[in-house]
Amino acid sequence: MFGSSIIVFRETLEAALIVGILTAATRGVSGRNRWLIAGITAGLAGSAIVAAATNTIAEMASGFGQELFSAGVLGIAVLMLAWHNIWMAAHSKELAIHARNTGRAISDGKRECSVLFAIIALAVLREGSETVLFLYGIATAGSQSTHTVLVGGLLGLTGGVAVGWTLYAGLLRIPLRWFFSVTSLLVLLLAAGMASQVARLLIQANLLPSLAAPLWDTSSLLPPDSVLGTLLHGLAGYDARPAGMQIIFFAVVLVSIVIGMKLISQPQQPSK
Amino acid sequence: MKKLFFITLFLLTSTAFAADAEFTIVIREHRFEPAELIVPAGKKIKLLIENQDSTPEEFESYDLAREKVIPGNSAASLYIGPLKAGRYPFFGEFNESTAKGVVIAQ
């Protein structure tokens, strides 16, 4: 039972980290809780569908449908995260004030909410579909009862959610003047890390050259299967032996988002 | 235009000559066969993974930086390399206790 707990825990953890960060990062955006819950629900429903469609997806694109699908899901998430950070760069001051007194509503918070919904749904869908496949496989293999598999899975799920919640609660304790800077940094690293994973998937499908693989090897310094390594992988796409192309994708997305954030927060001419 | 045609033809055929080495790994009873796969270093390699079990397995390796789910009773390919000489362990994430192997590049 605990073998399945650990695997479910790992998958849940990756999604829970993203949910925790995004929940903190959208603090003060009105209506955000509804969209958050809707995102998680949609992601869960989506993951069941994707798991059921695994064979079909796998056979697409000359057998590389899985890589393309994952890369697509991640790519959309990168764009959404970038949008969020750029939007936040324009609105964090308002939100900090709003977080202090709940009177005002953010006028275009609706779009930010749909972006939040998309990011959460995609994150849950990605990790959820692997989890569903895995649990279904164990259940049908018959070596463990369905009951044992479900209990084991629930344990892992609870553990993953607990870590995500701890992250969220920890972030909330950051003083307001640093709060949105910290969440923006975390979202930035999430986006760049996902971009690095997109590169990895496209290299795996032979659609991109690796350009020096690995560029460096930090497995002795920070083993990828250690607790810290796993956390860093979920937060920033840490790979102990990244390909050169992965680093390029990481750097390009990082720099692009930072430039976008800087541009939007330039002092503008008064519009009123 | 004729020049462009011949240059394209040359490039396409020269990629065809640089064919990737292909290797097969079979998953049977939650084990990889062969558990030790020897491949040439410095070349891009196409790994065909045949899952003869009825349950899905996730082929995963930190050292190769690869992961792919192979549904039950089906096969899938993925590319690795070019690899420097060395050992690159991999595992089946859904059955880690028995599904273990290593790619040895020489």
Image (cartoon, rainbow, N blue to C red):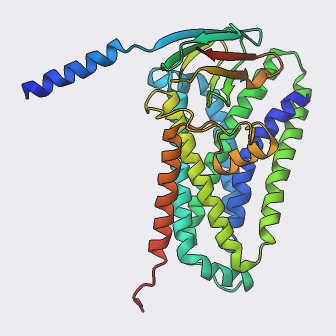
Res. A115 in view? yes
Question: Picture coordinates of residue A134 (x, y %)?
Answer: 75, 27
Residue A61 locus on image (x, y percent): 45, 25
Q: Which one is in front, A144 or B64?
A: B64
Query: Residue at 71% of width from left, 62% of height from top?
Result: A23
**Is B5 located above or below residue A15 in the figure?**
above
Given the current orientation, which residue lies at the most extreme left position?
A: B2
Image coords of residue A34 (percent x, y): 69, 62
The structure residue drawn at horizontal position 39% and vertical position 88%, both measured from the top left corner, is: A269
Could you tell me if residue A108 is visible in this image?
no
Residue B3 % position (x, y): 10, 26
Who's the residue at 58% across and 9% down the image? B24
Could you say which is closer to the camera, residue B27 or residue A1? B27
Quadrant placement of the N terminus of chain A: top right
> Disc count in the image?
0
- The quadrant holding residue A7 is top right
Residue B45 vertical position relative to residue A231 in the rendered view, above or below: above
